[in-house]
Amino acid sequence: MPVALVTGGSRGIGAAIAAALAADGYDVAVGYRGGADAAAGVVAAIEATGRRGVALAADVAVEDEAAGLVSATEDALGPIDALVLNAGITRDGLFMRMSSEDWQSVIDTNLTGAFYVTRAALRGMLKRRGGSIVAVSSVVGLTGNPGQANYAAAKAGLIGMVKSLAREAGGRGVRVNAVAPGYIATDMTADLPDTTRDQILGATPLGRLGTPEDVAGVVSFLCSDAAGFITGSVISIDGGLAT
Ligand code: NAD
């Protein structure tokens, strides 16, 4: 059976991606940092579909833990066919008041963490001459957003990483893409003030927030053979917000 690793798979968008990949026939490793119960719930749902699942705690911002997450996935389930770089955090604040710590922690988790996990998984994919990597970027990485310079820089950085790696790894059959979700209803966006939420809805042609399943469907497609000629792409899933 094909094997997938989803970082930040314990809740929100990552949990929906893990469920979608299990429905596609993958055995799925669910990486997470906090919330072991939630991760166990995602694994139980994967196992209910007849696929294998494993929950693996690791902080992707710590190099050894990120590498350990990849080797633990391979030990538990086998070589990784699909890698989804979804773990992410926000530490919002206006630029002039942003602490160095808030800048660094977002870059460390959202960008450097993705680099660590990808580098650890890539060797096997290159050797086996196949694999699909999908990074969960953001509309904010394309447009910027006041109060999110750290997050936008990390998400834009992911796009640069994906496009460069797509060029390096394409000759070995490894595809590397990104998705750029708009505002998706998850814990991450639960605390948006009503005025911000109304502004976002007003600027979104489809007039609603996205769901984790809206994102999961596109990630599932990018991991599939139907996307066999797609690499280095960034697919917006934002209801038209950035158009
Ligand atoms: P969430 O906060 O619900 O889930 C984040 C996940 O990342 C959790 O599983 C958490 O355990 C994990 N995580 C956080 N820091 C980690 C670390 N250091 N090491 C390992 N795992 C870590 O968020 P979400 O809304 O589901 O977002 C998932 C991804 O989608 C993030 O990368 C986020 O930036 C991106 N995104 C979200 C939205 C949105 O509107 N919700 C929009 C665009 C992009």
Image (tube, helix red, strand yellow):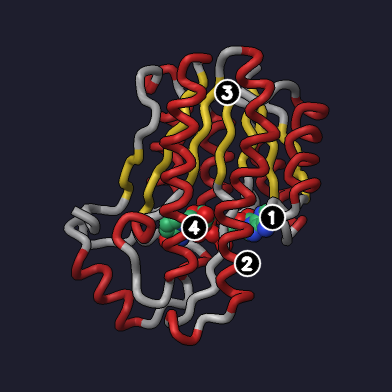
Q: Earlier in the sequence, mark 3 or mark 1?
A: 3
Nearest the viewer among 221 and 138 is 138
* C-alpha gap between disc 2 and disc 4: 10 Å
The CA distance from mark 4 to mark 3 is 31 Å
- Report which residue position mark 2 lands on: 105
Amino acid type, mark 1: Ala
Marks 1/4: CA–CA distance = 13 Å
Quote the CA–CA distance across marks 3 and 1. Answer: 29 Å
Q: Mark 4 points at which residue?
A: 154
**Residue labelled with disc 1:** 61
Pointer 3 and pointer 1: residues touching (CB < 8 Å)? Answer: no
Amino acid type shown at disc 2 = Ser
Q: Which residue is drawn at 80% across and 35% down?
A: 72
Disc 4 secondary structure class: helix
Q: Which residue is drawn at 49% across and 37% down?
A: 134
Marks 1 and 2 close (CB-CB < 8 Å): yes
Give the side of residue 93 with respect to residue 67, left or right. left
Who comes first in sequence, dot 2 or dot 3? 3
**Residue 167 picture location, percent across and down:** 43, 26
Q: How many labels does the image show?
A: 4
Q: Is residue 48 visible?
A: no
Q: Which of marks 4 and 3 is in front?
A: 4
Residue name at image x 30 percent, y 83 percent: 195
Q: Distance between the residues labelled 2 and 3?
A: 35 Å
Question: Please, is residue 180 above or below residue 108 in the view?
Answer: above
Tell me the kind of residue under disc 3: Gly
Front-most of 19 and 62?
62
Q: Where is residue 162 in the image (x, y as percent from the top left)?
A: 46, 38
Q: With respect to residue 168, does 60 lie above or below?
A: below
Q: Say the numbered circle drawn on residue 25.
A: 3
